[in-house]
């Protein structure tokens, strides 16, 4: 096999966000080592990299979901035509253009275990579309199961409910309000009132990858202790394709998606429709989701392009009742409602540019979500008093503009400058099904004695400009050192303003790197803090004394890579948080909204490793230890925090064998895990989870075996038939006391790719 001397790996990391690229030489690799289905890899020579060419991304054209079938028909018919000799030559030139226009990054392979180092001394994890496909997951949160330090909780086989459900290095169990930011295409998409992740509003078929930032990074994102950014899917190479996926299995679970697109000349479009449902592994634990998605782009000229994305999702998730009756001592609780519905419409419009010495984007977004709690429950029963029950709707509108620019005016240097303008329109409504006010004894305690109550929250505005600078000295293949510093300012319309700084240092030699960083995280509460001030029948003015919560984060990591053989890494970190916020949900106005005494600390160690002992066999593993302590206003120290496992272990294997077969297996293990909520309502004191809230250790092993094939008469390529088994050893486990999860489940399906 021919080997290229001095090569580069081209990886599309920030798709659809107009992000520029980094450049790092890598050791010689074979021409066969260039395939990645999610972020395409291309091997190019040093001469190609130096040439200037047309910008990679395309942009906007009006689209409607009704075009979906037309696109697929066009794709199939176009695939049937054999290109002429002149067309082949032109296609080779266009392919060359795509390679030449992209500045490169030295990330030859990405897996969810190994963190990606940045030039600012920080790290993030990347879950690719291929890895999500290997896991055979049915909802967004399950796609993160192999990321070190990350876990989720659920009571359903598919879908999620209200309150907290996703946890990153011990944060995420707070309620109401959120601990970190959930983003889609680089902009907010979550329950911005009570702080839910709202994973039901994201369909698997729209995900091109997921970036997980497990620590504050002011130069990367604003409010939040951490961030999850979903990269939208679209075509990255000239051509056309149509993909039909379908699978089904245990408990009436079924999934279907039809996706396809065309990328030709300056124009590209990608459309997707999907449906997923399950009857659930217990009574009243079913879920369903429908999704429609379009992402289109147009290349204006050599440097400029724009993209338009629109996504509509509607889902329903039922809430099962606990298997055992809740008491004050067994840690079991009732659900808050019988069913949770999510309906969301999301759009972004992005203008991107890329020149030799600077690149960036300007992005506008609008997202409206209705989150419904149907038949709310009190101690497991519907509300009475002639109401027919109660229902609530959270109306969430998020909109704004974000811009970022990277400047490379001198060798090894980078200036990063940008700003985020994020605005919200929020309303919460609770009403009786009968349309009449409650009657009889205790009526005043049911919906405040009214037929309908409305909490009309003030529109909020958060403006956060930021600046960062870094300078690399030396060469990446030899000794190198990169110091950096950054700053972000937060201007909030309802809460106190704040600022945050970061500093980092990367140093290394060849394939060994040491990264260190300090950063301050600023976490603004959602307007739910003002809930009892904004009742339309009894409004109260906002005293504007609420400060955001802050955390000081310290981290150091060491990684070493043996090219094409394996890697080892270790990361240690410390979080020190303060200024915990208290929500005003009922009663009299709190004397203080921020805890002046309490604090918390989370200390952690992560070890990661990958190995490729033989060709087509990859092994990966990661271990995370967490130690936490928290003190409230009562000055009592607590040594445990909810959903902060003392020990977490994830491992897996990928094996391609017998030419057409692929095998994937992964495992997740949690030990020292407690359920519960870090309440932001009614008190600054930190509750002790205690033995009643301790969950049994969890060990889950999942596997998938696939047969890949091509069939030219039907224009099929890289198509797949598979069989998947989850929880192979039929372990009994719970993420919440009284809500057992499913035992062994079996799924089978296919993926037909036409191109």
Image (tube, rainbow, N blue to C red):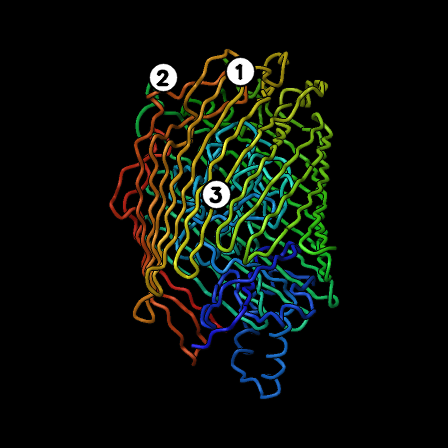
Which numbered dot is residue 683?
Answer: 1
Q: In the image shown, does 206 or 2 lie closer to the viewer?
A: 2
Element class at badge 2 = loop
**Residue 706 in view in this figure:** no
For the residues labelled 2 and 3, the Cα–Cα distance comes to: 30 Å
| Quarter of image, res 195 | top right
Please tell me how crowded label 1 is: few (under 14), some (14-19), or many (20+) other residues with Cα within 10 Å.
some
Q: In the image shown, does 734 or 626 lie closer to the viewer?
A: 626
For the residues labelled 3 and 1, the Cα–Cα distance comes to: 33 Å
Q: Earlier in the sequence, mark 2 or mark 1?
A: 2
Q: Is residue 736 left or right of residue 387?
A: left
For the residues labelled 2 and 1, the Cα–Cα distance comes to: 19 Å
Which numbered dot is residue 316?
Answer: 3
Tell me if residue 514 comes above or below residue 77 in the rendering.
Answer: above
Which numbered dot is residue 328?
Answer: 2
Q: Earlier in the sequence, mark 2 or mark 3?
A: 3
């Amino acid at each position: 096999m021919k080997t290229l001397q001095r090569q580069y790996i081209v990886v599309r990391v920030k798709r659809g966000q107009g992000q520029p690229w980094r450049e790092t030489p890598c050791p010689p690799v074979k021409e066969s080592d260039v395939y990645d289905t999610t972020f395409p890899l291309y091997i190019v020579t040093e001469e190609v990299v130096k040439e200037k060419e047309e910008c990679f991304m395309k942009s906007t054209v009006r689209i409607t979901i009704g075009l979906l079938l037309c696109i697929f028909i066009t794709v199939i018919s176009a695939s049937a035509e054999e290109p002429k000799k002149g067309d082949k030559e032109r296609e080779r030139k266009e392919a060359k253009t795509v390679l030449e226009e992209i500045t490169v990054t030295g990330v030859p392979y990405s897996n969810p275990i190994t963190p990606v180092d940045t030039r600012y001394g920080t790290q993030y994890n990347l879950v690719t579309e291929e890895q999500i496909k290997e896991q055979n997951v049915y909802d967004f949160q399950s796609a993160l199961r192999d990321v070190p330090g990350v876990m989720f909780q659920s009571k359903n086989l598919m879908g999620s409910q209200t309150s907290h459900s996703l946890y990153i290095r011990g944060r995420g169990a707070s309620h109401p309000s959120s601990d970190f930011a959930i983003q889609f295409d680089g902009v907010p998409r979550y329950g911005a009132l009570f702080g839910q992740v709202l994973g039901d509003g994201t369909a698997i078929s729209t995900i091109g990858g997921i970036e997980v930032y497990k620590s504050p990074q002011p130069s990367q994102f604003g409010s939040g202790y951490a961030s999850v950014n979903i990269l939208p899917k679209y075509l990255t190479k000239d051509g056309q394709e149509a993909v039909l996926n379908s699978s089904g299995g245990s408990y009436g679970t079924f999934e279907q998606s039809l996706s396809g697109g065309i990328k030709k000349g300056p124009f590209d479009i990608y459309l997707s429709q999907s449906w997923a449902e399950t009857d659930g592994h217990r009574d009243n634990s079913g879920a369903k989701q429908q999704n429609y998605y379009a992402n289109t782009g147009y290349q204006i000229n050599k440097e400029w392009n724009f993209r338009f994305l629109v996504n509509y999702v509607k889902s329903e998730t039922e809430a099962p009742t606990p298997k055992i009756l809740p008491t004050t001592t067994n840690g079991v609780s009732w659900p808050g409602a019988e069913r949770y519905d999510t309906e969301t419409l999301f759009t972004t419009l992005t203008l991107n540019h890329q020149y030799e010495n600077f690149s960036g984007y300007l992005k506008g977004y609008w997202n409206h979500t209705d989150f419904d709690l149907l038949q709310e429950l009190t101690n497991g029963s519907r509300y009475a008093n002639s109401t027919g029950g109660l229902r609530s709707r959270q109306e969430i509108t998020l909109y704004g503009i974000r811009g970022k620019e990277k400047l490379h005016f001198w060798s090894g240097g980078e200036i990063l400058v940008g700003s985020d303008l994020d605005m919200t329109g929020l309303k919460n409504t609770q009403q009786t099904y009968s349309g009449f006010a409650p009657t009889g004894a205790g009526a005043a305690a049911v919906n405040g004695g009214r037929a309908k109550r409305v909490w009309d929250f003030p529109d909020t505005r958060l403006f956060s400009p930021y600046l960062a600078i870094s300078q690399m000295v030396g060469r990446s293949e030899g000794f190198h050192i990169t110091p950096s510093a950054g700053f972000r300012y937060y201007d909030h319309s309802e809460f106190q303003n704040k600022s945050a700084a970061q500093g980092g240092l990367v140093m290394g030699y060849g394939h060994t790197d040491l990264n260190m960083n300090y950063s301050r995280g600023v976490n603004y509460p959602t307007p739910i803090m003002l809930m009892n001030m904004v009742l339309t029948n009894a409004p109260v003015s906002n005293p504007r004394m609420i400060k955001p919560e802050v955390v000081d984060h310290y981290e150091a990591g060491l990684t070493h890579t043996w090219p094409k053989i394996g890697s080892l890494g270790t990361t240690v970190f410390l979080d020190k948080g303060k200024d915990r916020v208290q929500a005003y949900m009922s009663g009299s106005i709190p004397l203080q909204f921020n805890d002046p005494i309490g604090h918390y600390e989370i200390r952690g160690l992560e070890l990661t490793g990958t190995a490729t002992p033989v060709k087509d066999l990859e092994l990966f593993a990661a271990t995370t230890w967490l130690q936490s302590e928290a003190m409230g206003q009562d000055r009592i120290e607590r040594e445990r925090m909810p959903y902060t496992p003392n020990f977490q272990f994830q491992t897996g294997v990928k094996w391609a064998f017998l030419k057409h077969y692929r095998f994937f297996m992964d495992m997740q293990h949690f030990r020292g895990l407690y359920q519960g909520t870090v309440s932001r309502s009614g008190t600054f004191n930190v509750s002790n989870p205690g033995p009643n809230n301790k969950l049994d250790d969890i060990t889950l092993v999942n596997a998938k075996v696939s047969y890949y094939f091509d069939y030219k008469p039907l224009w099929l390529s890289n198509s797949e038939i598979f069989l998947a088994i989850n929880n192979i050893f039929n372990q009994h486990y719970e993420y919440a006391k009284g809500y057992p999860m499913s035992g062994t489940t079996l799924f089978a399906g296919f993926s037909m790719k036409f191109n």
